[in-house]
Image (cartoon, rainbow, N blue to C red):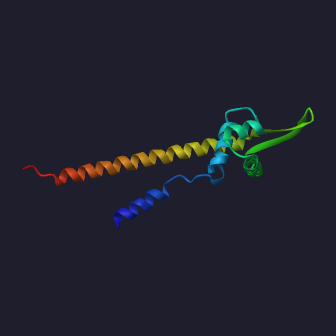
Amino acid sequence: MPELEGRASSRRSMPELDRLVHEPGRLAILTLLSSVADADFLFLQRATGLTKGNLSSHLSKLEEAGLVRIDKRFVRKKPQTTVTISRLGRERTARHWEQLEALRDQAVSASQASQSARRSAASSRVRPA
């Protein structure tokens, strides 16, 4: 069982992902917003591929958490919704990407260690004739 204990301890050291940010639709929204000053609703809808309802729902959750600001106004008698990422939203998005990179690095390291152990075990089993 030592192998299982090693796996459990490596799981505990994995970065804790921000579930609000990690959801694919919200991560796409936040990532887009982090690269522009602001974006209107239609741009976000086209860029993310989300339906109006899904985009609206995700934006509401992000606004409630203080990650984005939503400005609704009329331009030439047409409604226009503009979304801006907040400083908190920018920080949490950047932290999330850092955590994903750390997770990837841990997976690569674990894979390399596992391959090395297998090679070592295989070479110890091979006996010259």
Q: Is residue 103 left or right of residue 109?
A: right
Q: Is residue 64 left or right of residue 11?
A: right
Q: Is residue 32 left or right of residue 3?
A: right
Compared with residue 13, is residue 39 higher up or lower down, i.e. above or below? above
Disc tally is 0
Q: Residue at x 70, y 38 (%)?
A: 46
Provide residue 25's location: percent of width, then percent of height: 66, 47
Q: Is residue 8 left or right of residue 98?
A: left
Provide residue 28's location: percent of width, then percent of height: 65, 42
Provide residue 8's location: percent of width, then percent of height: 44, 62
Residue 94 appears in which quarter of the rendering?
A: top right
Compared with residue 17, is residue 76 higher up or lower down, i.e. above or below? above
Q: Residue at x 41, y 60 (%)?
A: 7
- Considering every residue shown, the one lying at the far right of the view is 77
- Quadrant showing the N terminus: bottom left
Residue nearest the viewer, comparing 68 with 75: 75
Residue nearest the viewer, comparing 39 with 101: 39
Q: Residue at x 48, y 45 (%)?
A: 104
Compared with residue 16, is residue 100 higher up or lower down, i.e. above or below? above
Q: Residue at x 69, y 45 (%)?
A: 50
Compared with residue 29, is residue 1 higher up or lower down, i.e. above or below? below
- Considering every residue shown, the one lying at the far bottom of the view is 1
Provide residue 102's location: percent of width, then percent of height: 50, 45
